[in-house]
Image (tube, rainbow, N blue to C red):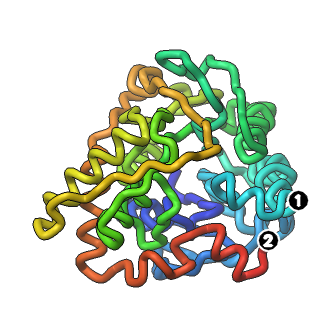
């Protein structure tokens, strides 16, 4: 899997993943509209292609000479999706199977799809495994789940397909997002001297961005038989939102000794997604076990804030998907 195409590679995960894969010896082609800015630097083994995944001919051209596709491109998270459901459906669902068809026709040998653990919606099950019914609460979750069987329709010995259902990713990225739970709470603790929790009782699985990228790298290296036709949950720590807030409070107070007692303020929410995902299958089948914690993610974000890598983190729209899409009139 020497040559890798990453649709959506200019996003939150992609801007960490692409340089990591280059450092590991891969040649990477990033294909992205760059709605949220372009943070990557092209090089001998990192090609940057500005393109829309709905442009079938352009995407087909980008697949030429590629061994593996890691499909990250989408309108990400529920509020962003709801800005313009027609636009979001066209990006997250309508063009998905044509992408798969073009990749296979171009001779791509491996297709890795980033679905979402939010496809489970609300579940009281103590351990939500990959066999759990999909009970999406929103169109974003629904279309993520509906793309999965589309991909597997094209599974064949020479076109290996795998779906990952990641937990909420957290930690620092050059294309930073401050609209993800751990990142939001850390930003508020550092810059507003308080943590606002919406609800608090919802269970939310999390995964450090470094572990997310390590997993994608591993999926390029494994033999076909280990991952062909498989769906894997990918999470680490399952905590309630209130538990996460308490972790953030503790870590930020340790990182910033002048912040002696950061209050946690609770407000109501209509976001009732709650589930406790079980990631035993991925450990058992391919040996993937995350190494980094929520606390590590908080430390990483704090260090980036201290280093001036995230200026105007409360006000700059580039850190917030909804604000950016509105300003660009993409939605």
Q: Nearer the viewer, residue 296 or 67?
A: 296
Disc 1: CA contacts within 10 A as few (<14), some (14-19) or many (>=20): few
Look at mark 2 in the image and give the residue it sits on. Answer: 331
267 up-or-down from 319: above or below: above
Q: Earlier in the sequence, mark 1 or mark 2?
A: 1
Q: Position of residue 60 (x, y in %)?
A: 79, 63
For numbered disc 1, what is the local secondary structure?
A: helix
Per the model, the C-alpha gap separating discs 1 and 2 is: 9 Å
Query: What residue is at 60 percent from the left and 60 percent from the top?
Result: 6
Please tell me which residue lies in front, 137 or 258: 258
Residue located at (55% from left, 77% from top) = 318
Q: Nearer the viewer, residue 164 or 202?
A: 202
Q: Position of residue 112 (x, y in %)?
A: 61, 44
**In the drawing, does residue 157 fall left or right of residue 188?**
right
Up-down: is 176 above or below 105?
Answer: below
View extreme (left): residue: 257
Q: Where is residue 306, by image quadrant?
A: bottom left
Q: Is residue 26 left or right of residue 75?
A: left
Q: Residue 66: where, in percent of width, then height?
A: 63, 58
Q: Position of residue 296 (x, y in %)?
A: 25, 52
Q: Is residue 152 left or right of residue 239?
A: right
The residue at 80%/32% (across/down) is: 153
Which residue does the numbered mark 1 point to in the structure image? 86
Q: Secondary structure at mark 2?
A: loop
Is residue 9 among the parts visible in the rendering?
yes
Q: Mark 2, residues whose alpha carbon is within 10 Å: few (<14), some, or many (≥20)?
A: some
User: Along the horizontal axis of the image, is 320 left or right of 266?
Assistant: right
**305 is higher (above) or lower (below) than 270:** below
Can residue 234 be seen in this snapshot?
Answer: no
Q: Is residue 37 above or below residue 229?
A: below
Residue occupying image coordinates x 84% and y 57%: 85
């Amino acid at each position: 899997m020497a040559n890798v195409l990453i649709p959506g590679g200019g996003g939150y995960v992609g801007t960490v993943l692409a340089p990591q894969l280059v450092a590991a010896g891969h040649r990477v082609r990033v294909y992205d509209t760059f709605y949220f800015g372009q943070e990557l630097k092209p090089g001998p083994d990192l090609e940057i292609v500005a393109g829309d995944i709905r442009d079938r001919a352009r995407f087909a051209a980008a697949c030429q000479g590629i061994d593996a596709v890691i499909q990250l491109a989408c309108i990400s998270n529920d509020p962003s999706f709801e800005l313009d459901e027609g636009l979001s459906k066209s990006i997250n669902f309508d063009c998905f199977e044509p992408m798969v068809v073009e990749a296979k026709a171009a001779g791509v040998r491996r297709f890795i799809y980033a679905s979402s653990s939010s496809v489970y919606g609300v579940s009281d099950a103590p351990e939500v495994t990959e066999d759990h019914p999909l009970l999406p609460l929103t169109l974003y979750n629904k279309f993520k789940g509906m793309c999965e069987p589309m991909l597997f329709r094209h599974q064949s010995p020479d076109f290996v397909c795998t779906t990952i259902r990641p937990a909420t990713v957290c930690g620092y990225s050059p294309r930073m997002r401050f609209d993800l739970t751990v990142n939001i709470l850390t930003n508020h603790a550092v810059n507003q001297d308080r943590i606002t929790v919406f609800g608090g009782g919802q269970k939310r699985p999390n995964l450090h961005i470094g572990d997310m990228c390590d997993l994608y790298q591993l999926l390029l290296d494994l033999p076909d038989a280990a991952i062909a036709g498989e769906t894997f949950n990918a999470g680490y720590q399952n905590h309630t939102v209130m538990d996460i807030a308490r972790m953030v409070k503790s870590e930020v107070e340790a990182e910033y000794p002048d912040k002696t007692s950061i209050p946690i303020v609770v407000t109501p929410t209509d976001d009732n997604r709650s589930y406790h995902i079980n990631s035993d299958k991925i450990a058992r089948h391919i040996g993937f076990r995350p190494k980094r914690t929520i606390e590590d993610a908080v430390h990483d974000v704090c260090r980036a804030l201290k280093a001036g890598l995230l200026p105007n983190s409360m006000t700059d729209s580039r850190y917030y998907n909804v604000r950016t899409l509105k300003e660009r009139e993409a939605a």
